Amino acid sequence: MKQFAVFGNPIAHSKSPDIHRAFAEQFDIDLSYEKVLVSEGKFTAFATGFFERGAGANVTVPFKEDALRFTDKLSEDAKLAGAVNTLSRQRGVIVGDNTDGVGLVKDIRDNHAQTFTGKNVLIIGAGGAARGVILPIARENPQSITLVNRTITKAEQLAEQFLPHVAVTTSPFEKLEQPFDIIINATSASLSGQQLPLTPVVIDANTFAYDMMYGAEPTPFMQFAEKHGATTADGLGMLVEQAAKSFEIWHGVMPETHGVITEIRDKLVE
Ligand code: NDP
C-alpha cells in the first residue's frame, strides 16, 4: 500500500486525509494518508524518515519553505511561489510542487463560473498564500493584478520578485479608489475574526469576493463584501481543488471534486 501524509503544525484540524481517502475511493486505489504533527525545526528529520517508504506528502503551515529546501527538483509554480505544498518521490528523487494557486483558479473559474480573462483582480495580502496564487492567476490573462497589504513594503517586494514574468501593481488600502471584478482575500485576518481596513469603494454589484479561509459561517470579509453588494465564496473549494491536483501528480488521474466539496462542507456544519 502506498503511503502518504500531510505535515504541519498545528495539524489536528486538517481535512486532507478525508479528502484523499474520498478521491482514492473513486479509483479503487488502496493508500494510507496520515496527519503528521511536526515540531518546529524538525521538518527535514521528519520528511527524511517518511520518504524512506513514503510516496508523497502534502505540506502546510509553517513548513512550506522548509519543504522547498528539502526538494531535489522543483516545478515552475513552486519556484516562483517560493513554497512547496506537494512532495513526491520519483525514482529516488524528491520533487516539489505548489498546487495552491492552481486549486484557487480552478475553484473560482470552474466551480464558481467566474472568468479571470480581461478582469481587474485585487489580491489582499502578501504572505505565502498570496505569493502562491499570483502566477496561476496571471496565466488566465486578467486585465490587471493589484496587490494590497497592511505592510506595503512586503507587497512591493513581492511584486518586484514576479518581474519580468508578471506585472503586479501595488497599493496601500487607503489609495484604492475603484471597484474590482474579483477580490481575493489572501490574508489571515479572518482566522482571528478581524476586519480588513477595506473601503466599500472597491466593491460593486459585479464584484466576486473570495476568502481563502473557510468555515461553517461566512467570514468577516465575506460578510463585508456581501453587505456592499458582492457575490462571495470561501476557500473550501480551493482546499479540495489543490488536493485534487496533488492527487493527480501522485496517481496520474484527476478525481471528481464536486461531491467531495459537498461532503467536507457538510462535515463543517455538523
Ligand atoms: P502569512 O502569515 O504568510 O501572511 C498573512 C498575511 O495576512 C500578511 O499579508 C499579513 O499582512 C496579513 N494580515 C494578517 N492579519 C491582518 C489584519 N488584521 N489586517 C490586514 N492584514 C492582515 O499567511 P498565509 O499567506 O500562509 O495564509 C493566509 C491565509 O490563506 C490563511 O488564512 C490560510 O488559512 C489561507 N490559505 C488557504 C488555503 C486553502 O486551500 N483554502 C491554502 C493556503 C492558505 P502583513 O504583511 O501586514 O503582516
Image (tube, helix red, strand yellow):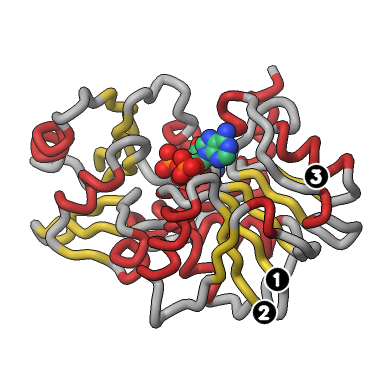
Distance (Cα) linking label 2 and label 3:
22 Å
- Tell me the tag on residue 225: 3
Asked whether the viewer can see residue 22, the reply is no
**Residue type beneath disc 1:** Asn
**Residue type beneath disc 3:** Ala
Quick one: label 1 or label 2, which is nearer the N terminus?
A: 1
Using residue 251 as the reference point, say whether residue 26 is left or right of it: right
Measured from the top left, where is residue 81 in percent x and y?
36, 60
Quick one: label 2 or label 3, which is nearer the N terminus?
A: 2
Q: Residue, x 60% and y 70% (percent of image)?
A: 145
Distance (Cα) linking label 1 and label 2:
5 Å
Residue identifier under label 2: 143
Measured from the top left, where is residue 214 in percent x and y?
63, 35
Using residue 170 as the reference point, say whether residue 198 is left or right of it: right
Distance (Cα) linking label 1 and label 3:
16 Å
Q: Residue, x 57% and y 56% (percent of image)?
A: 104
Residue identifier under label 1: 120
Q: Is residue 156 above or below residue 53?
A: below
Q: Return the residue found at the far top.
A: 270
Using residue 181 as the reference point, say whether residue 97 is left or right of it: left
Badge 1 element? strand
